[in-house]
Image: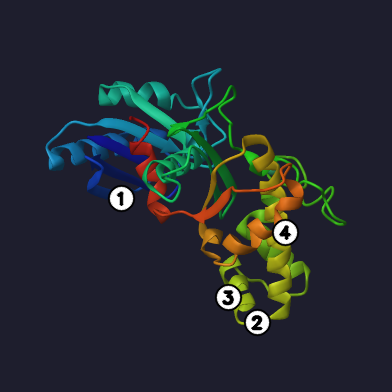
Amino acid sequence: MRIGIDLGGTKIEGIAIDDGLVRMRRRVPAPRDNYTDTLAAVVDLVRDIEREVGRRGTVGVGIPGTISRATGLVKNANSTWLIGRPLGDDLPRLLERPVRFANDANCFALSEAVDGAAADADIVFGVIIGTGTGGGLVVSRRVVDGANSIAGEWGHNPIPAPRDGESPGPPCYCGRTGCIETFLSGSGLSRDYRDAGGQLSTAHDIAMRACHGEALASAVLARYEERLARALGTIINVLDPHVIVLGGGLSNIDRLYESVPALWAPYVFSDTVTTRLVRAAHGDSSGVRGAAWLWD
Ligand SMILES: [Zn+2]
């Protein structure tokens, strides 16, 4: 049995997969700002799952960030109470077994590559477009972590081939300006709509207005699609993925799956582009499922 844990900022989710089937799933609130309580919550969740299913399992954990190879401590996590903590030592000790960890976007990509929207594909790039623009890379059903544990982090590259007004671009929380994330996150889309004269709106509302024929929303969404095509075009040149899977709130915008592949060809160094752009099959469950699949 494989147990997956998704260590989120507001909730901790656990899942048990056995013979490819979900045996159990449970969510508990995340103890915000408290590392010790977070450890205890994860241990309790694993023990509860094992007691109810009646079996011991392997444990994989998806985290918002990564465990530094240099220090063994958590880095790059937006759940800041995990930063600098020895999660990779503490959880295996408390659970009395080895534990595998991966960035939550990598877990998302793995889930979709194993039995989701990219199940038949060898090279899979997973993108979560929502609050941020996370990314993860899976090759032959294995997460590619990388020398610095940042493989797939495309969101903090500068937007490629910048147009007027895109360079230096908006400031990003990472300290740079004009990052892909500042244009392609949900808040990036909302800002663009407001700057173009629209009222303050969520990405979902802008997509609905475009769907109902509002000219301003349509124009802003078209600009979003063109930027996404540029940003993914450079990914295709480097990784040449068979499938790019979109997850997160903005992945629910239906028109992306036709419009973006129709726009990315000029940025790809190939006469034909067979890379498929697809929507995640497992929705919000991809992260926790992928954590379970860290053990194969
Ligand atoms: Zn950035």
**Quarter of the view holding residue 221:** bottom right
Residue at the spot x=60%, y=63% of the render?
A: 258
Q: Which residue is mark 1?
A: 27
Per the model, the C-alpha gap separating discs 2 and 3 is 9 Å
Closer to the N terminus: mark 2 or mark 3?
3
The reply to whether callout 3 and callout 4 are in contact (CB within 8 Å) is no
Residue at the spot x=53%, y=20% of the render?
A: 69
Name the side, left or right, on which 229 lies relative to 145: right
Closer to the N terminus: mark 4 or mark 2?
2
The reply to whether callout 2 and callout 3 are in contact (CB within 8 Å) is no
Name the side, left or right, on which 180 lies relative to 137: right
Q: Which residue is mark 3?
A: 208
- Residue 260 x, y percent position in the rendering: 65, 58
Q: Which sits in the foreground, 70 or 58?
A: 58
Closer to the N terminus: mark 3 or mark 4?
3
Amino acid bearing label 2:
Gly
Q: Which residue is mark 2?
A: 213
Label 4 within 8 A of ligand 1 by Cβ: no
